[in-house]
Each structure stands twice: as C-alpha cells, then as structure tokens.
Image (cartoon, rainbow, N blue to C red):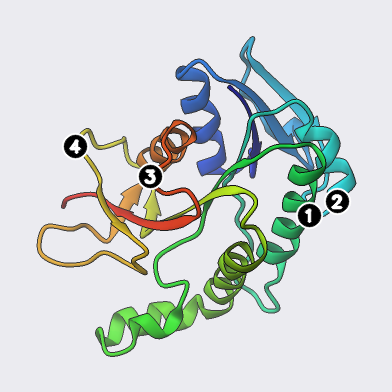
C-alpha cells in the first residue's frame, strides 16, 4: 500500500512512518520543512507541501492508497488548524481518488463529556479547550461532509514517549474517553502509531471514531 503521512515530522508522525515501513508499505512523508525529517528508507519519499493547500496536497496524494494524519497544533487560540487542514486534505483526496483516511484526535474532543468527572480532569480539559474544540469540529466535518471517504478517527488519551506496550489495546467505538480500574490515562505514541497503521487494512472503524487506551 502507498501511504501519505501528514504531520510527518512530529513525534507521532515519525513513528507512523516507521511502523508503516516496517509493515511493508511505501510511504510519502508530506512536510512543510522536509529537512526536519531525518528518517531514511528505500520505500520512503519526502514531499514538500502545505497542509492548507488542496492543490499541493492533491499532487502529493496522487497514486496513493491512503492518508494517515498525525497533525498537531498549538493550543493557543484561535485554533483552526485541524479543520482548515482537513478540508484541504479531503478536497485533495477526492481530486486524487484516495479513499482511506486515518487521523488522530484525542480523548474529550467533546469537552462537555468531562463534566462531573473530577476537578483535575476538568481543569486539564479546560486548559486544552480550544484545541479539543477544533478537533471536534474536524470530526464533525468528516461526519457531515465526508461520507464518501473511508475515514477513521483515533482518540487516545495523553501521549508519552515510552516504549510500546505489547498487550492488546482497550478499544471503545464512539467513546469520548476510556476510564476505569486498570486503564492508564497515558498511552505510548508507539502504540498509537501501530494502531493507526493497522487501521489501513481493517474496516471495523470505517466512518467511525474509536477511543484507545492501554492497561495500567
């Protein structure tokens, strides 16, 4: 499979690239600053493009089978990067006849889902409110306007840079979060990257969102 990766120079994006290459995919890393990407592989190419330009992304996506987005933006308001980049990506996917999309958001993109769940959780969600709200706007855009694409929204909790855990992930379709005894609030980026790449060949969550977590 030929896979385009958005957010390729970020910490999660680089792990997505590594996981996709490990599984035998050909990868195109799409970056505003390609020099930031130090990975080298015979099946890895790097393309310079703006994530906000449908025209540039159309050229980058041409002859690809899927797109994986691990884009992230600053929490400082106004936050519009998720919706603006996704609208450009969707237009480009349509123009280049790419159907499969796997993208990263987070727990509690609907910030009201955290109400009544404890002082510190609500404080943390409030701290990230603008970021989470724009993530949710992106999700809603896909739900309402991208029914022709095979998208999957992946919602993890807090990300860390620890080594991947070997056990199966806890998965909850359509959930805004996963909590309870034995469930960790943080998840290694490597596990998230692995799960996202696995979705390229799994249709369980097509046009759905799924929350994921690891056991503590």
Question: How many numbered circles are shown?
Answer: 4
Mark nearer the N terminus (3 vs 2): 2
Give the spatial CA distance, label 4 vs label 2: 39 Å
Q: Nearer the viewer, mark 4 or mark 3?
A: 3
Residue placed most toward the observer, 136 or 214: 136
Give the spatial CA distance, label 4 vs label 3: 20 Å
Residue 185 horizontal side relative to residue 67, left or right = left
Q: Nearer the viewer, mark 3 or mark 2?
A: 3
The residue under label 3 is 204
Residue at 58 percent across and 22 percent down: it is 1
Residue at 24 percent across and 37 percent down: it is 165
The residue under label 4 is 167
The residue under label 2 is 53
Give the spatial CA distance, label 1 vs label 4: 36 Å
State the SS at label 3. loop
Residue 142 horizontal side relative to residue 158, left or right = right
Position of residue 95 measured from the top left corner of the image (x, y, whole percent): 82, 42
Question: Do the CB atoms of the residues marked 4 and 3 lie less than 8 Å apart?
Answer: no
Position of residue 29 measured from the top left corner of the image (x, y, whole percent): 68, 31
Mark nearer the N terminus (4 vs 3): 4
State the SS at label 2. loop
The residue under label 1 is 88
- Check the image and name the residue furthest to the top: 42
Question: Do the CB atoms of the residues marked 2 and 1 lie less than 8 Å apart?
Answer: yes
Give the spatial CA distance, label 3 vs label 1: 26 Å
Give the spatial CA distance, label 3 vs label 2: 30 Å
Question: Do the CB atoms of the residues marked 3 and 2 lie less than 8 Å apart?
Answer: no
Occupied quadrant, residue 125: bottom left
Q: Is residue 138 above or below residue 54?
A: below
């Amino acid at each position: 499979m030929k896979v385009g990766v958005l957010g390729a120079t970020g910490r999660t994006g680089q792990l997505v690239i590594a996981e996709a290459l490990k599984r035998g995919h050909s990868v195109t890393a799409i970056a505003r600053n390609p020099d930031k990407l130090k990975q080298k592989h015979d099946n890895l190419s790097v393309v310079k493009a703006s994530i906000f330009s449908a025209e540039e992304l159309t050229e980058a996506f041409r002859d690809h089978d899927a797109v994986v987005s691990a884009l992230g933006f600053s929490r400082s308001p106004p936050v519009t990067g998720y919706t603006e980049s996704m609208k450009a990506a969707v237009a480009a996917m349509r123009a280049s006849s790419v159907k499969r999309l796997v993208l990263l958001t987070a727990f509690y993109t609907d910030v009201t889902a955290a109400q009544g769940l404890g002082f510190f959780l609500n404080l943390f969600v409030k701290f990230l409110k603008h970021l989470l709200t724009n993530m949710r706007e992106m999700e809603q855009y896909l739900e309402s306007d991208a029914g022709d694409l095979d998208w999957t929204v992946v919602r993890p909790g807090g990300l860390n840079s620890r080594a991947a855990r070997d056990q199966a992930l806890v998965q909850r379709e359509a959930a805004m979060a996963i909590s309870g005894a034995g469930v960790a609030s943080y998840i290694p980026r490597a596990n998230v990257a692995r799960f996202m790449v696995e979705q390229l060949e799994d249709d369980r969550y097509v046009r759905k969102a799924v929350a994921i977590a690891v056991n503590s």
